[in-house]
Amino acid sequence: MSRRMRVYVDGGQFDITELIADLCGLSLNSAGLLVKGCGMDMAYWLADHITYLLWPDKDKRPKWLKGNGGGCLEWKTL
């Protein structure tokens, strides 16, 4: 199973899907970046993966990064 996803910031004003695909090493087409997996919340995985890539040392992450469940960037699905 897989999902195509797009990533927006600032209330949906800016599409950063291409930047996130490059950061995460995910394939990209006009529908969005490709996240493969089964039996998981792919939006949560992507937010958590972005957090890990930007701040691999959990102790050095900014304190405002509380997100969903603790570690990931705050995210919403549309």
Image: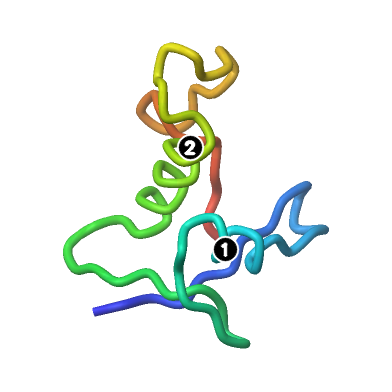
Give the left or right position of residue 66, taking residue 45 as reference. right
Residue 63 sits above or below residue 21 on the image? above
Q: Say few, some or many: other residues with alpha carbon within 10 Å of mark 2 (under 14 / 14 to 19 / 20 or more).
A: many
| Snapshot quadrant of residue 52 | top left
Give the residue at x 58% y 17%: 62
Residue 33: x, y in percent? 51, 73
Left or right: 2 in relation to 9? left
Position of 4 relative to 76 (above/below): below
The amino acid type of the residue labelled 1 equals Asp
Q: Which of 75/33 is in front?
A: 33
User: Any mark on residue 51, and which?
Assistant: 2
Q: Position of residue 21 (x, y in %)?
A: 55, 65
Cα–Cα gap, marks 2 and 1: 14 Å
Amino acid type, mark 2: Thr
The disc label shown at residue 22, or none: 1
On the image, the x and y values in percent for residue 41 come to 31, 56
Position of the C terminus, as image quadrant, is: bottom right
How packed is label 1: few (under 14 Cα within 10 Å), some, or many (20 or more)? few
**Residue appearing at x 61%, y 61% in the figure:** 7
> Would residue 8 be found to the left or right of residue 58 on screen?
right
User: Considering only order in the chain, which callout, 1 or 2, is on the residue closer to the N terminus?
Assistant: 1
